[in-house]
C-alpha cells in the first residue's frame, strides 16, 4: 500500500570509491543505510551529478563494498562521469520510469496501448528497467494474456528497438521453425530453392541452445555466418539468398533482453513468443513467411491443439503486421535426416542438394519451399512442391547453394568429403529385438552434445534406424562420432545411461507391492 | 514453450580472472558465448568446482568483463573456492531451485502448500532465487491473491527464516501501526503503560523510511535502540518493556529480502503485507496485539473499505496463528501531536508522560493501551482506557519509561530541556484567512526531512494549528527547525513550494478556455 517515496528532496553527497572493474550495466554501489535514508532501493535509477556532468546509473546496495558516505563506481561509470577516487558526487533519485505504471496496469488485467508498450520496450533498451520490473511485466503477460493488438504493438516496438534490413526489393520471403527436432535442417535446402526460383530470402538463423546444432552452426561448416547487416544486404542483392547467424546482427534487439529474463523462468507466454518470432521476420522486411510447427513426443510442442491455436494466432497477427503467413504443423516425433551435429547434418543437406540424401529431409524441405512459392504468388496453388522438387533435381538449387556459400566467404567447389567429420566412432547396438517405437530428438541431442557438438563441428550422432523399423538384438541403432577419444568415451557413457531409442513394449510400467 | 535445458552434460572448464572487489551476492561473470553454449543464462545458479572444493554462485553474463574461456570472480567467491588468477575452474549448471515449479504453480492460479511456501522462503534466504524469480513470485501473488492458509504458511516461513525472542513468560503483548501519520508516537507512551500494568511488551519498531521520524529514531534521542536479541531479552525480563530498532535484530529475516523487491515495484499485495507484519509479531512470541490502521487523506490507507477488509483479515489470520488481535481504524487525516522530527516528537511524548502534552497523542495512546489491556484479559472490558489513563496520570508510566530508557543505556533522569532541539527556527505564516481544511502528514514530513530530519535529530516542524482552526492572514501555522542555517533555508524553499496546510475553499478548481 505504501507508495514509493518521492520525499527525498534533501541532497545526498557521497565520496567516490572507484573500482578498476569493467561492468556491463551502469551500476553504482551505495551503502544500505545511506540508500534507505534517501528512499533509494536496489535497482532504483539514480542521477549522479559532478559539476556540469550528469548521468543515470542503477543503484546496488551493499554494507561491505562501501561504507556509509561512500559510493562505489566501476570503471565505465567512473569514466563517464569523470570522477576520481575520493571526489564528492551528488546523488539524487530519478523519476521512476514511465513503464512502471504500465506494468502495474497489465498486472491489473488492463490492455496496454501501443504507446505504453513502446515505452516499456524503449526503457528496457535504455537499461531503465530492473530485472525485477521486467520479470513483473513478463509474469503479468503470462497470467493476464495479451490481445492481438498488444502483440502487434509489441512486435512493432521490438522491430523499432533494433536495426532493419532494407533491401529495396520485393517480395521478400522468409521461413521459421519452432524447433526441437534433431537434424531438421530444411532451411539450408529451402533457401537455395527459393533463391533459385528468383525470389529474395535473407534468412537469419540461430545457433543451438539445447540442441546439437542450429542452422547457423551447420552452415558455418561451409561458410562464415557472422555477417553484418551490410554484408547480408550485398549477398542477398547478389544471390537472392543468405544463411546468416541472427546473433551477428542487431535485428529485433529487445528480443535478446526479453529472452534473458524469460529463459531462467521458462516463461514463454504465447504473446511474447509470437512477437519475438514475427519481429525478426518484420526486421528483414518479410512479405511472406512459412512457419513450421513440429509436434510430437520429443518436440517442443506436444499438444496438437496448442499447435493449431498457435498457427491461427500467427496468421492473424501476421495479417495485422502485413506479413502473409502460412503454417505447416509437421510430424516432429522423430529426427529428420540421419546426422545430428553440425558437420553430420551438413552432410545430409549436401547429399539432398546433390540428388541423394535422406528422403524425409528432401520431402519436408520441398513441401515447405513449395508452400512458400505458392504463398508468394510466384507459383500457382498445387504446383509449389513440384516446382521446388524440379529446382532440386535439376541441380539449380545446388548451384545456387554453392553461389551463396561463396558469397558468404566459403568455397563454392567444396566436396562432400571435405566435411570435417570426427575421427572417433562408436556403434551403439540394440539390446533387444522388436519394432522401434520412438527415436528421441532431445536425448539424441544430449548424446551428440556429450560427444562435443556443436562446438566440435565434426561430433554428433549418425542414425541407422527410424521409428517403425524392425531391428534385431545386436543391430546398430546409431553411431556416436567425436573429435577426441575422451569425448567419445564420455558420450558412450551418456548413451548407455538413457534410452534414446525405444522398442515397442506391451507392458509400459509395472507396479508391485 | 521451451523448457530450461538440462542437456549441458559436457564439462565447461574456464580460466579464473580474479577481481579485487567485494560483492554482496555470490556472483561470477561468464562470457556470453560460453554461457549460451552451455545453456547457462544470467541469474542461473552454477556449481564451481576446484579440486575438492565446490560452491554455488550466480552467473552474470558479460562480453566485456571476461573473454571466452574465462570466468570472472570477485574477492568473496575467489576466497571461498580458493582460486588464484589464471587457474582453471570447472563450471556446471545446478538443478533449478525447487521453488521455480511452485512459483509457476502460483502463476497458474493454484494454491501453494505449506511445504512449497516454506521452500520458496528457504531458497530465498539461501540466495538461490534471482531477483527476476522473486519478482515473478510477488507479481503472481499480487494478481492471483493468496488464501488465508497461504498467508499463515508464509508468516510461519518468514518467522522460521530469522531469530525468535524466547522470553519464557506469558502473556506477551504487542502493537503495530500501519503508519503514514506524522507525529504518531503512541508506542513510546503505550509501552510504559502496558509494562507499568505488569505485562510484557518487547516492542521493536522501524526507523523512518519516507517520514520525518520513526519510533526507533525518536526513542534514540533518549537511549540506544540498536539492541541485540539477548539485550532485548534481559531488558524485558527486568522492566517488562523495551523500544528497540527492529533492524538491529534478525527477526523475520526473509521480510527484508521481500521488501527489497516489493519496494521498487510498489508491489504490496495484501497477503504479503499481512504476513510481513504478523511474522514480526510472532517472532517476539506475541499472544495479543492491537493494530492501529489510520485512514484519511495523507495517510497510507485512504479508503475506509480497504481498512475494514484489512482489519478482518488481520483478526482471521491472527486467530490461525494463535495471536489474539484487535484492530482500531483511527482518524489519520491529521498529524498527531505538535512535533514532526525525532527530538520534537520525543518532546511531545515526554510531555504526555509528565502530565501535559498534546491531547490527541495522550488520548490515542490511552485508547490503544486500554484496548490491549482488555484484549489480554488483564483488565475487564470497558475499563481499559481508564486504567491506562490512571497509570499515565499517576506517574507510573513515566517512572516505567525512565526505567526502560535506563535499561537500554540512556539516562533515567533526563529532563525535557535536555532534548536536542535545533537552534535555527523559521515561522511559516498563513497567506490567507479562514478555517483550516487539511494538515498534510506527507507534505509536512517532506519539509521536516528537507530541514534534516531524521538524521539531524533536532530538525523538523512544530505545528501551531490543526484542522478546524480558524486563522488570520499572518498567523503562524508552523515553525521549521533545523540544525544549520543552510538546511533551514532549503526547508523554507520547500515549504513555500508546496501547500502543507490548506484553508477551506468554495471553489476547488477552475476551468477556463
Image (cartoon, coloured by chain):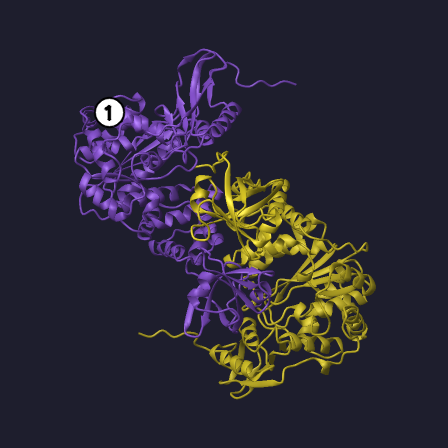
Chain colours: A purple, B yellow
In this figure, which residue is indicated by the disc labeled 1? A354
Residue A279 visible: yes
Q: Quadrant of residue A26?
A: bottom left
- Figure quadrant of the N terminus of chain B: top left
User: Circle 1 sits in a helix, a strand or a loop, which is it?
Assistant: loop
Q: Nearer the viewer, residue B229 or A410?
A: A410
Residue A487 in the figure: left or right of residue A271: right
Across and down, in percent, residue A367 comes to 26, 27
Q: Nearer the viewer, residue B345 or A79?
A: A79
Across and down, in percent, residue A270 comes to 40, 41
Q: Residue at x 24, y 22 (%)?
A: A355
A127, above or below A388, in the image? below
A233, above or below B414, in the image? above
Residue A274 in the figure: left or right of residue B482: left
Residue B383 visible: no
Labels in figure, total: 1
Q: Quadrant of residue A511?
A: top right
Across and down, in percent, residue A316 comes to 30, 40
Amino acid at each position: 500500500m505504501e507508495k514509493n517515496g518521492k520525499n527525498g528532496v534533501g541532497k545526498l553527497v557521497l565520496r567516490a570509491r572507484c573500482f578498476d572493474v569493467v561492468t556491463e550495466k551502469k551500476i553504482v554501489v551505495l551503502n544500505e543505510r545511506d540508500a534507505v535514508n534517501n528512499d533509494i532501493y536496489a535497482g532504483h535509477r539514480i542521477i549522479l551529478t559532478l559539476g556540469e556532468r550528469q548521468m543515470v546509473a542503477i543503484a546496488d546496495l551493499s554494507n561491505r563494498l562501501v561504507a556509509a558516505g561512500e559510493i562505489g563506481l566501476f570503471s565505465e561509470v567512473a569514466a563517464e562521469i569523470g570522477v576520481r577516487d575520493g571526489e564528492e558526487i551528488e546523488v539524487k533519485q530519478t523519476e521512476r520510469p514511465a513503464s512502471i505504471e504500465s506494468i502495474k496496469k497489465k498486472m491489473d488485467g488492463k490492455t496496454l496501448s501501443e504507446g505504453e508498450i513502446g515505452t516499456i520496450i524503449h526503457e528496457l533498451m535504455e537499461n531503465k528497467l530492473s530485472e525485477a520490473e521486467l520479470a513483473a511485466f513478463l509474469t503479468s503477460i503470462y497470467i493476464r494474456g495479451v490481445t492481438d493488438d498488444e502483440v502487434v504493438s509489441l512486435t512493432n516496438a521490438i522491430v523499432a528497438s533494433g536495426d532493419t534490413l532494407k533491401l529495396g526489393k520485393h517480395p521478400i520471403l522468409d521461413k521459421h521453425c519452432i524447433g526441437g527436432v534433431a537434424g531438421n535442417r530444411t532451411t539450408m535446402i529451402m533457401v537455395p530453392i527459393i533463391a533459385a526460383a528468383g525470389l529474395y530470402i535473407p534468412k537469419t538463423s540461430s545457433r543451438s541452445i539445447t540442441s546439437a546444432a542450429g542452422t547457423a552452426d551447420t552452415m558455418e561448416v561451409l561458410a562464415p555466418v557472422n555477417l553484418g547487416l551490410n554484408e547480408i544486404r550485398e549477398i542477398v542483392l547478389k544471390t537472392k539468398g543468405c544463411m546468416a547467424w541472427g546473433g551477428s546482427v542487431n535485428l529485433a534487439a529487445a528480443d535478446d533482453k526479453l529472452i534473458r529474463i524469460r529463459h531462467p523462468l521458462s516463461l514463454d507466454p504465447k504473446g511474447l513468443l509470437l512477437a519475438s518470432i514475427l519481429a525478426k521476420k518484420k526486421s528483414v522486411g518479410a512479405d511472406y513467411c512459412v512457419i513450421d510447427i513440429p509436434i510430437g513426443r520429443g518436440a517442443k510442442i506436444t499438444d496438437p491443439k496448442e499447435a493449431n491455436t498457435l498457427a491461427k494466432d500467427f496468421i492473424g497477427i501476421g495479417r495485422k503486421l502485413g506479413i502473409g503467413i502460412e503454417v505447416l504443423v509437421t510430424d516432429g516425433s522423430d529426427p529428420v535426416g540421419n546426422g545430428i551435429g553440425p558437420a553430420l547434418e551438413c552432410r545430409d543437406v549436401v547429399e539432398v542438394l546433390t540428388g541423394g540424401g535422406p528422403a524425409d529431409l528432401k520431402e519436408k524441405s520441398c513441401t515447405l519451399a513449395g508452400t512458400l512459392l505458392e504463398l508468394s504468388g510466384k507459383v500457382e496453388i498445387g504446383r509449389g512442391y513440384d516446382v521446388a522438387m524440379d529446382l532440386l533435381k535439376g541441380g539449380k538449387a545446388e548451384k545456387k547453394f554453392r553461389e551463396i556459400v561463396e558469397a558468404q566467404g566459403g568455397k563454392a567447389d567444396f566436396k562432400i568429403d571435405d566435411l570435417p567429420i570426427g575421427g572417433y566412432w562408436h556403434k551403439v547396438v540394440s539390446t533387444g529385438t522388436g519394432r522401434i517405437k520412438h527415436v528421441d530428438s532431445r536425448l539424441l541431442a544430449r548424446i551428440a552434445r556429450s560427444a562435443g557438438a556443436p562446438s566440435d563441428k565434426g561430433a554428433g550422432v549418425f542414425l541407422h534406424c527410424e521409428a517403425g523399423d524392425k531391428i534385431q538384438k545386436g543391430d546398430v541403432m546409431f553411431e556416436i562420432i567425436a573429435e577426441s577419444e575422451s569425448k567419445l568415451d564420455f558420450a558412450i557413457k551418456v548413451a548407455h545411461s538413457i534410452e534414446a531409442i525405444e522398442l515397442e513394449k506391451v507392458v509400459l510400467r509395472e507396479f508391485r507391492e
